[in-house]
Image: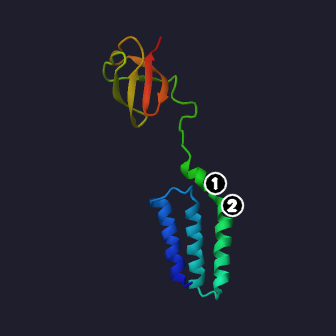
Amino acid sequence: MPWWGWIIVGALLFGSELMLVDAAFYLVFIGAAAIITGLTVMAGVGLELWAQWLLFAALSIISMVLFRERIYQKLRAVKNDYPSGLSGETIRLDEDLAPGESCRHNYRGTTWTVLNSGSEAIEKGKDIQIQKVNGLTLVVGQTQ
């Protein structure tokens, strides 16, 4: 196969994983192996067709076995900047919040939805405790 054929196939595989299909990061490594094979052939290394396919297969398998899991976990892992969570921390709202109602509040650089789970209204400027985090919603109640 000509060098440009390998590079086109590699770019299509690589791009389809990143843009169209979530194949658990396998197509990225297969595409990268095809591109490396194309670059090797372009560099003038005289490889027969069977040797090109062998190089492609070896690069695909070796890279997937050695690197795919670690890279996939780093890219797909949910990062939690707050290992203990936000539960137990206190915030101070800029507006009154009735029981069962919610409002928007800026906290630690992000806009959150704050839900009053208590039975009493929370007055503006009063410290309230975060009871739990549900997605992007802070469930709060008054501190004792």
> Can you tell which mark lies on residue 28?
none
Residue 56 horizontal/vertical position (percent) = 63, 74
Amino acid type of the residue tagged 2 in the rendering? Leu
Question: Relative to 54, is 116 on the left or the right?
Answer: left
Q: Nearer the viewer, residue 10 or 80?
A: 10
Per the model, the C-alpha gap separating discs 2 and 1 is 8 Å
Q: Residue at the spot x=60%, y=77% of the render?
A: 37
The residue that label 1 is drawn on is 70
Considering the image in quadrants, where does the N terminus appear?
bottom right
Residue 31 image-quadrant placement: bottom right
The residue that label 2 is drawn on is 66
Amino acid type of the residue tagged 1 in the rendering? Arg
Give above or below for 5 relative to 103. below
Answer whether labels 2 and 1 touch (C-beta < 8 Å). no
Classify mark 1: helix, strand or loop. Answer: helix
Residue 114 horizontal/vertical position (percent) = 39, 26
Question: Relative to 48, is 75 on the left or the right?
Answer: left
Classify mark 2: helix, strand or loop. Answer: helix
Q: Nearer the viewer, residue 17 or 89?
A: 17
Residue 12 horizontal/vertical position (percent) = 48, 70
Q: Residue at the spot x=48%, y=28% of the render?
A: 133
Give above or below for 67 relative to 104. below
Residue 102 horizontal/vertical position (percent) = 35, 24
Figure disc tally? 2
Q: Which residue in the rendered view is the most extreme toward the left?
A: 95
Residue 110 image-quadrant placement: top left
Give above or below for 32 relative to 50. above
Q: Residue at the spot x=51%, y=66% of the render?
A: 14
Using a 10 Å C-alpha cutoff, classify the residue at mark 2 as few (fewer than 14 neighbours), some (14 to 19) or many (20 or more): few
